[in-house]
Amino acid sequence: MIAPALATLPAALAARLDDAQRQALLEAPREKRLAVLAAALALPEAEALAALAAAAGLDTASNLEPDPAARGLLPPSSPSVSAIPPRRDRRWPRSTSPPPGCPTRS
């Protein structure tokens, strides 16, 4: 059974595809869908993306750098959890020794 075109693709683009092309688009893995759509429309991927964005009424981002003024809102990258030794008093009771191979503070 073929899914309704309106549920997956804007009507302007769905009208340009036949049932087999629509089905191929629905069955394609997410990372391949743009390539499948571009092949079905006989367009380069960049033009297919622009056509899809226009038909859906969405903008596409071309500059993916964060706004310098907004960088302070982003959390700093945290070091690997394995690089941070656990606090002795929270990981095991003080009366016992740490597990073998576990880093401890001297």
Image (tube, rainbow, N blue to C red):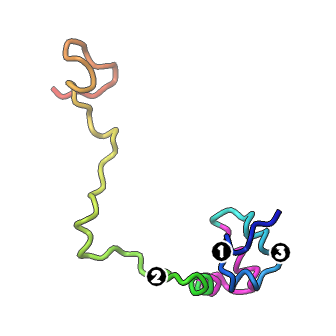
**Label 1 sits on residue:** 34
Looking at the image, which residue is at 84% across and 73% down?
20
Please state the horizontal and vertical placement of residue 47, each as a whole percent of the image.
62, 87
Give the extent of the magenta segment: 32-49
For the residues labelled 1 and 3, say whether their Cβ atoms are less than 8 Å apart. no
Q: Quadrant of the C terminus?
A: top left
Depth check: 41 or 83 in front? Answer: 41
Q: Is residue 34 magenta-colored?
A: yes
| Rendered image: mark on residue 19 | 3
Tell me the SS state at disc 3. Answer: helix
User: What kind of element bears circle 2?
Assistant: loop
- Answer whether labels 1 and 2 touch (C-beta < 8 Å): no
Horizontal side of 74 relative to 5 (left or right) equals left
The foreground one among 68 and 51 is: 51
**Label 1 to label 3: alpha-carbon separation:** 17 Å
Vertically, is 76 above or below 15?
above
